[in-house]
């Protein structure tokens, strides 16, 4: 699976342009996903020297991405002023509707092909409940 992973707020706490503390188990989970054969793209708003700092930070912790802010490693985005949106199978981002699950849950969802609805039917709320008719029109 090709997975795009955000950096600030997802791998580390938000401290941009600085690098925040690692979110618990983020790099361990990313390394395990790579070992499982997934291709990871670092997908971040960072560019230039702040991007290089993030790449270096990850590499120091044993996480080497298949690609950085691009669909494939050979694509040159170094001189672009913003990161292009990448095409992938899955995005992991703290700005996801519903927020960022913990990294153990993220791994389980990917490894077992689970959805939010499968993990927590309550997330569907009243949307799945049939509405009772109140009268003959409504």
Image: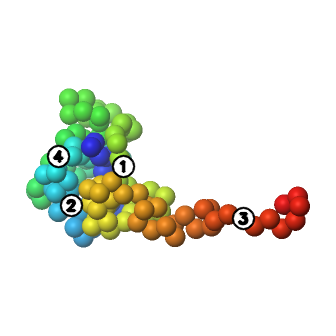
- Residue picked out by circle 3: 131
Q: Residue at x 21, y 61 (%)?
A: 29
Q: Please say if 26 is above or below 6.
A: below
Label 1 or label 3, whichever lies nearer to me, is 3
- Using the image as rendered, state which of residue 95 and residue 2 is in the foreground: 2
Residue 10 at what x, y percent from top left?
32, 60
Gap between marks 4 and 1 measured at Cα: 16 Å
Precedes in sequence: disc 1 or disc 3: 1
The reply to whether residue 95 is visible in this rendering is no
Q: Please say if 112 is above or below 3.
A: below
Label 3 or label 4, whichever lies nearer to me, is 3
Q: Residue at x 52, y 70 (%)?
A: 122
Q: Secondary structure at mark 4?
A: loop
The reply to whether residue 108 is visible in this rendering is yes
Q: Please say if 67 is above or below 54.
A: above
Gap between marks 4 and 2 measured at Cα: 13 Å
Q: Residue at x 17, y 63 (%)?
A: 28
Report the disc number at residue 29.
2
Precedes in sequence: disc 1 or disc 2: 2
Q: Quadrant of the C terminus?
A: bottom right
- Residue picked out by circle 4: 37
Verify CB contact (< 8 Å) between mark 3 and mark 4. Answer: no
- Using the image as rendered, state which of residue 56 and residue 30 is in the foreground: 30
């Amino acid at each position: 699976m090709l997975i795009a992973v955000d950096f600030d707020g997802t791998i580390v706490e938000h401290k941009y342009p600085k690098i925040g503390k690692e979110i618990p188990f983020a790099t361990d989970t990313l390394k395990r996903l790579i070992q499982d054969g997934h291709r990871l793209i670092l997908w971040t708003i960072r560019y230039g020297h702040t991007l290089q700092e993030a790449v270096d930070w990850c590499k120091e912790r044993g996480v080497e991405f298949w690609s950085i802010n691009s669909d494939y490693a050979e694509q040159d985005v170094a001189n672009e002023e913003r990161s292009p949106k990448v095409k992938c199978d899955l995005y992991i981002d703290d700005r996801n509707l519903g927020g960022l699950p913990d990294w153990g849950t993220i791994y389980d969802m990917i490894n077992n092909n689970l959805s939010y609805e499968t993990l927590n039917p309550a997330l569907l709320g009243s949307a799945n409940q049939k509405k009772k008719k109140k009268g003959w029109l409504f």
